[in-house]
């Protein structure tokens, strides 16, 4: 019986090792992001690329309210001119709620909100509840990661990155 289980066990070990080998490491200072495209609340694509200097990210509504307070009264070009992007993970929200309520509400905002609907683009980004993650980039290399707890902190992060 052991002889019959040995090949199966070896295959299981090999597949497990392969799965762990293909998992991406969490984003941290010193990491280099791969460029990617992600759609905003209007369905228009945006690019995280070598020109992106500040990448802001959240997974919860409290953090999203910070972003609205920070950018809601700014001109539409405020974030793009600063080479900054705001991403949210909406994968945990039922698609009916996302499509019927959340996105129509977001479409009224002047600033772009990039939506990760399947948590495939933002899965490796760190986050803390009720805070906006602020990833500072230099040609896609992460130079620092901060967590903003206020609208003022977000504005300062964007303006620091624009310099």
Image: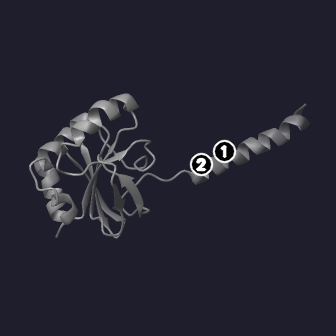
Which residue is denoted by mark 1 in the rendering?
A: 16
In this rendering, would 43 be left or right of 162? right
Looking at this view, is 28 or 93 the one in front? 93
Q: Are marks 1 and 2 in contact (CB under 8 Å)?
A: yes
Q: Secondary structure at mark 2?
A: helix
Is residue 76 visible to us here? yes
Q: Position of residue 123 (x, y in %)?
A: 43, 46
User: Image quadrant of residue 6?
Assistant: top right
Answer few, some or many: residues within 10 Å of disc 1's Cα (few below 14, many 20 plus, some between 14 and 19).
few
In this rendering, would 64 be left or right of 19? left
Alpha carbon separation for disc pair 1 and 2: 6 Å
In this rendering, would 14 be left or right of 32? right
Q: Residue at x 11, y 56 (%)?
A: 75
Q: Residue at x 25, y 45 (%)?
A: 132
Q: Residue at x 9, y 49 (%)?
A: 73
Which residue is denoted by mark 2 in the rendering?
A: 20
Say how many tags the image has: 2
Is residue 82 visible to us here? no
Q: Position of residue 70 (x, y in %)?
A: 13, 48
Q: Quadrant of the N terminus?
A: top right
Q: Secondary structure at mark 1?
A: helix
Q: Position of residue 139 (x, y in %)?
A: 34, 70
Indicate whether 9 appears above or below 82.
above
Answer few, some or many: residues within 10 Å of disc 2's Cα (few below 14, many 20 plus, some between 14 and 19).
few
Colouring method of the image: one colour
Q: Quadrant of the C terminus?
A: bottom left
User: Image quadrant of residue 89?
Assistant: top left
Q: Residue at x 15, y 59 (%)?
A: 78
Indicate whether 47 appears above or below 40.
below
């Amino acid at each position: 019986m052991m002889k019959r289980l040995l090949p199966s066990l070896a295959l299981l070990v090999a597949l497990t090792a392969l799965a762990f080998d293909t998992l991406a490491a969490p984003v941290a200072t010193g990491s280099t992001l791969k460029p990617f495209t992600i759609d905003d609340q209007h369905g228009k694509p945006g690019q995280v690329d070598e020109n992106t200097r500040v990448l802001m990210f959240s997974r919860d509504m409290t953090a999203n309210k910070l972003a609205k307070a920070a950018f809601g009264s700014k001109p539409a070009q405020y974030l793009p001119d600063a080479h900054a992007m705001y991403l949210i993970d909406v994968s945990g929200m039922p698609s009916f709620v996302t499509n019927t309520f959340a996105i129509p509400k977001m479409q009224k905002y002047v600033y772009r909100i990039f939506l990760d609907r399947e948590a495939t683009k933002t899965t490796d980004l760190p986050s803390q509840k009720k805070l906006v993650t602020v990833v500072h980039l230099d040609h896609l290399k992460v130079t620092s990661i901060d967590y903003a707890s206020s609208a003022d902190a977000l504005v300062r992060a964007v303006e620091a990155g624009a310099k």
